Image (tube, helix red, strand yellow):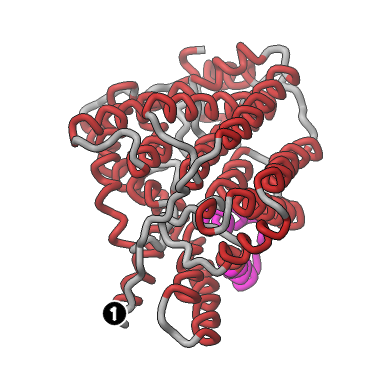
Amino acid sequence: MATTTALPRKKIQSRNKASQDIPDIPQKTRELFLYAIALFSLLTGFFFNSPKEIFEGLLRIQLSPSVLLSDFMEVGNIGAAFVNSALMMLLYTRVAKRSGTLVSGPLMASLLTIGGFAFFGKNLYNSIPIVTGVFLHAKYRKEPFGKFILPAFFGTAVGPIVSQISFGFVLPHAGSVFLGIAAGLLAGFIIPPLASQFIRFHQGYSLYNMGFTSGIVGMLFMSIMRAFALENNREVLLLKESSPYLMVYLLLLFSAMVLFGVSHDRNWPKRLLHLFKKPGQLVSDFTASDGFSVTVLNMGLLGFLSLGYLYLAGGTLNGPVFGGIFTVVGFGAFGKHVKNVIPVMAGVYLSNFVFHWEVSSISSLLAALFATNLAPIAGAYGILPGLLAGFIHMAVVMNVGDLHGGMNLYNNGFSGGFVAAILVPILDALNINKYTWEEDL
C-alpha cells in the first residue's frame, strides 16, 4: 500500500487504466491450460513410439547421469522424452495445486521450464529429492510450502547432482543411490535462502535467478566431488536423426496459444502493445498486469520467434533445443516479450561471426535461446545495451560450465547472472536512461 501511494499520480492512473476490462480467466481454466499442454505431449509421445519402447526409454532416462548435455530423445527415444516431459508437468502442476499456489506468470514459467528441461536433464528420479528438500526447508521454518514453490520447481536444475552421484560414478550401487538422494535433499534444503540473496547480485535483470543460484550450488557439490577425485563424464549426447513431426508439434502448440489469446480478449492488440512496453525486470507477472489471455498470446508469439531464429541459424530440433524453446515460451508469462528478447538474440547471433563460432551449433543455438534471460536489460536500457548483453553472454557462457561440471542444467542462467551483475552498474554509472513504460502510455 505504501509503495502505491508513493508513485506519481500519472503512473497510478496509467497503471489502473491499463488494467481496466482485462478478461477474468478462472483459475480452473488456467489449470486446464497447463494440463492440456502436458496431455498434448503425452499423446505425442505415443505417436512416435510404442508403449513398450516408451517404457524402456523412460527407464533409461531415469537411470541416466543426466549431466549437461544429455538429450533424452537420444538417451531414451523421442516418445519417451515427450512422456517424461508430460509426467513431469502433470506431477508438478498437481503439486502446485495441492500447495494452494494459484496459476500465475511465475508458476507458468516454472512449469514450462520443467517441461522443457524434461527433454534434456530433468526426470522424476532426480527432481523429486530436490523438491522434497525444499519442502523440508519449509517445514523447518514452519512456513507453507506454497511460499517456496518457485525455488522448488526452478531448483530442479540441480537434478544432475542426484543422477550423477547415483549412476555416474563407480560406486557401490545401493550406496550411490542413497548418497544421490541425500545430496538432492540437501541441495533442495539450501536453495531457498540462497535464491533470495542472489537476486540482489544482478538486481533482477537476469530472469533466471535460479540459474545463477543453481550454478553456485552445482559448483559447491562438484567441488566436493572433485575433492574426492570424482569427475563426471561430460559426453554430449544429441539426437542423431531429427523428425519433421517435432516441428509440427511446436507449430500446433504455438498456434493454439495464439488462437486462445486472440479469442479470449477482444482488446488484445492494445493490451499486447501495452505488454511490449514492460521492461520485464523481476518480478513481472504478465498475467496480473495484462491478463492471462494476452500473456498466452505473448507466449505463442515467442514460440514462433524462437522457431524463426532456429530457421535463420540453420539449426535442427532435438531435446536441448526443445528445452530452450519451452523456457523462452514459459517466461513469456514472466518477463519476456518479443520486443525485449530480439536485441539479446541478435547480440548472440552477431557474436558468432566475431568469435568465429558456428551459428547452427548446439552451443550457439542454446546460447541464443537462453540468453533471453537478459531481456530486461534490453527492456530497461534499450536496444544497444540489449545487443551488448547478448554479445557478452555468448563469450561468458562458453567458460562457466566447467565451474559446476554440468551439475547445473541452467548454465546460461548462471552466465546471465554474471553478465547482468557486470553490465547494469556500468549502464547506471553512464546514466543510460532506463525505459519506464508507464510514462509512454
| Residue that appears at 62% across and 47% down | 111
Q: Residues within 10 Å of mark 1 (few under 14, many from 20)?
A: few
The spot of residue 352 in percent (x, y) is 25, 33
The spot of residue 280 in percent (x, y) is 47, 31
Reply above or below: 72 against 252.
Answer: below
Dividing the image into 4 quarters, which one contains the N terminus? top right
| Residue that appears at 26% across and 27% down | 350
Q: Secondary structure at mark 1?
A: helix
Left or right: residue 409 compared with residue 146? left
Q: Is residue 134 on the magenta stretch?
A: yes
| Residue that appears at 50% across and 76% down | 166
Using the image as rendered, state which of residue 321 and residue 139 is in the foreground: 321
> Which residue carries the number 1 mark?
227
Reply above or below: 394 against 124.
Answer: above
The spot of residue 220 in percent (x, y) is 35, 69
Amino acid type, mark 1? Ala
